[in-house]
């Protein structure tokens, strides 16, 4: 685990640039065509989210996150940090490469 481009270690949270909203929405992490991992979306901003898993699972650097809110939406995300069953993700942008 090395440093992230912004200079923070992968396990450390970066300072927030956008306002976050506390939510409790059901989510699913897409790990493959037949593998969905349930989670709860706890904080949400225009740039990313904090998710909580039922148990600690090592998440990949990039994955799709399905969020059930007023509608069902799937977003591509990048893992920013993870501590046990809690993780922070940022929404992928067109500049991201896989």
Image (tube, rainbow, N blue to C red):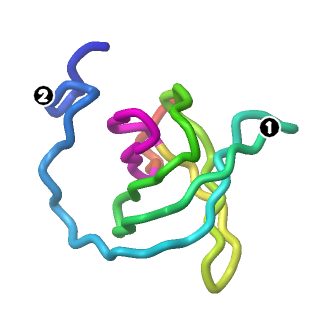
With respect to residue 72, does 13 lie above or below?
A: above
- At x 37%, y 35%, the residue is 82
Q: Quadrant of residue 21?
A: bottom left
Residue 83 highlighted magenta (yes or no): yes
Q: Residue 33 appears at what percent x and percent y?
A: 84, 38
User: Label 1, label 2: how many angstroms apart (C-alpha)?
Assistant: 33 Å
Q: Main secondary structure of the magenta part?
A: strand
Q: Could you tell whether 68 is left or right of 92 in the image?
A: right
Q: Quadrant of residue 19?
A: bottom left
User: Which residue bears the numbered disc 2?
Assistant: 7
With respect to residue 41, does 96 lie above or below?
A: above
Residue 41 highlighted magenta (yes or no): no
For the residues carrying marks 1 and 2, which lies nearer the camera in this image?
1
Magenta stretch in the rendered image: 78-91
Mark 2 surroundings within 10 Å by alpha-carbon count, few (fewer than 14), some (14 through 19), many (20 or more): few
Which residue, as the protein is rendered here, is positioned at the far right? 34
Q: Are marks 1 and 2 in contact (CB under 8 Å)?
A: no
Quarter of the image where the C terminus is located: top right
Which residue, as the protein is rendered here, is positioned at the far top? 1
Q: Residue 10 appears at what percent x and percent y?
A: 27, 27
- At x 26%, y 14%, the residue is 2
With respect to residue 7, does 88 lie above or below?
A: below
Mark 1 surroundings within 10 Å by alpha-carbon count, few (fewer than 14), some (14 through 19), many (20 or more): few
Instruction: Specify which label sits upstream in the sequence, 1 or 2.
Output: 2
């Amino acid at each position: 685990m090395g440093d992230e481009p912004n200079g923070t270690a992968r396990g450390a949270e970066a300072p927030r640039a956008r306002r976050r909203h506390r939510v409790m929405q059901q989510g699913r992490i897409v790990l493959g065509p037949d593998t969905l991992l349930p989670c709860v979306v706890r904080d949400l901003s225009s740039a990313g989210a904090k998710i909580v898993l039922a148990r600690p699972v090592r998440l990949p650097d990039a994955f799709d996150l399905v969020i059930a809110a007023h509608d069902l939406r799937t977003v591509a995300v990048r893992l920013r940090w993870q501590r046990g069953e809690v993780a922070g993700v940022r929404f992928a942008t067109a500049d991201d490469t896989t």
